[in-house]
Amino acid sequence: MARPVTHALPCTGGIGLRAPHYRQVLDRLPRLGWVEVHSENFFGGGAPLSTLLRVREHYPVSLHGVGMGLASTTPLDKAHLSALHRLCDAVKPAAISEHLSWNSAAGMVINDLLPFPYTQEALSHVATRIEQVQEELGRQLLVENLSSYLSFAHSEMTEGAFLAELTQRTGCGILFDVENLYVNACNLGVDAKAFIKAIPAEAVKEYHLAGYSVRDGCLVDTHDHPVCPEVWEMYEFALQHIGPRPTLIEWDSDIPPLPVLMGEAAKAQQRLEICYACAE
């Protein structure tokens, strides 16, 4: 199979663009490096897609999926994939990404991002599905590391090793969610530095940063708070070992005023600029 076409976001801070900020962004055209939206919100066309196409006239757009279920054992949803293909043709995104998770079984679709064991069997299965997606879209897919609240005793490799092999087999890229890694380090004892050193730097095309909540002593990936100091520190470690990449601030619940979101993106931009300066 031919290697998929790759696209590039500007290596700046960006924001997850959500409905409460559509009008303000289009009316004021603030200085944003780029924006990311959830793909499925625009499959129906109509006013949402019309709005996104207007945004696309001013900013690079990344499409981030939450419903494909790359690790599910049920066949890929052809209708879902066709809708994503049509959306890509319309928007011409600078990047397309999807979570490395499963979400369906026995004909039922579960509205969640569920983990799976990192085995050779799972690796072959997920690689085949990623190749199918990239073949259909004619574009590189970025896969995101998952926040998880359990680990599997029969995993045969670490998540970092799994991702490294997956990129080698398929030519896909990595969307490295730093906050997800921090959640897993706190909840499951994952060695965050070992993960960062295991994934191939050249495959990392984007970072995500977000805030979490704490429930019954467990960190939960809720995207409803500012980025915490410890996640900023982990991001800085990633910048040192992987290098600067386009960096997104995700905020999906209790969404703050746009200036607050842009302020978080500016913090990422400052760290990117420091990383560039140190490399010179």
Image: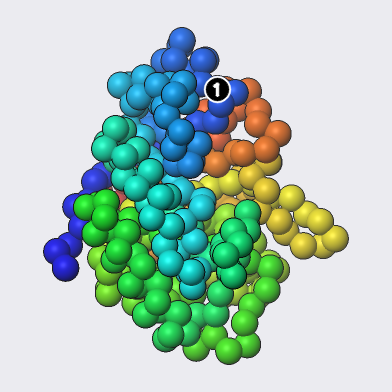
Residue 237 seen in render? no
Of 195 and 116, the residue lying toward us: 116
Q: Quadrant of the N terminus?
A: bottom left
Image spot of residue 156 (x, y percent): 50, 88
Q: Quadrant of residue 86?
A: top left
Disc 1, SS: helix
Image spot of residue 107 (x, y percent): 57, 65
The residue labelled by disc 1 is 21
Is 171 left, or right, of 70 in this rendering? left
Of 33 and 24, the residue lying toward us: 24
Q: Residues within 10 Å of mark 1 (few under 14, many from 20)?
A: some
Q: Which residue of the protein is positioned furthest toward the front in this rendering?
A: 107
Residue 196 lies, with reference to residue 95, above or below; the image says below
Q: Which residue is at 54% across, 85% downward?
A: 155
Q: Which residue is at 60% across, 38% downward?
A: 251
Residue 95 lies, with reference to residue 1, above or below; the image says above
Q: Which residue is at 59% across, 70% downward?
A: 106
The amino acid type, in three-letter code, at marker 1 is His
Of 272 and 70, the residue lying toward us: 70
Q: Which residue is at 22% across, 52% downward?
A: 138
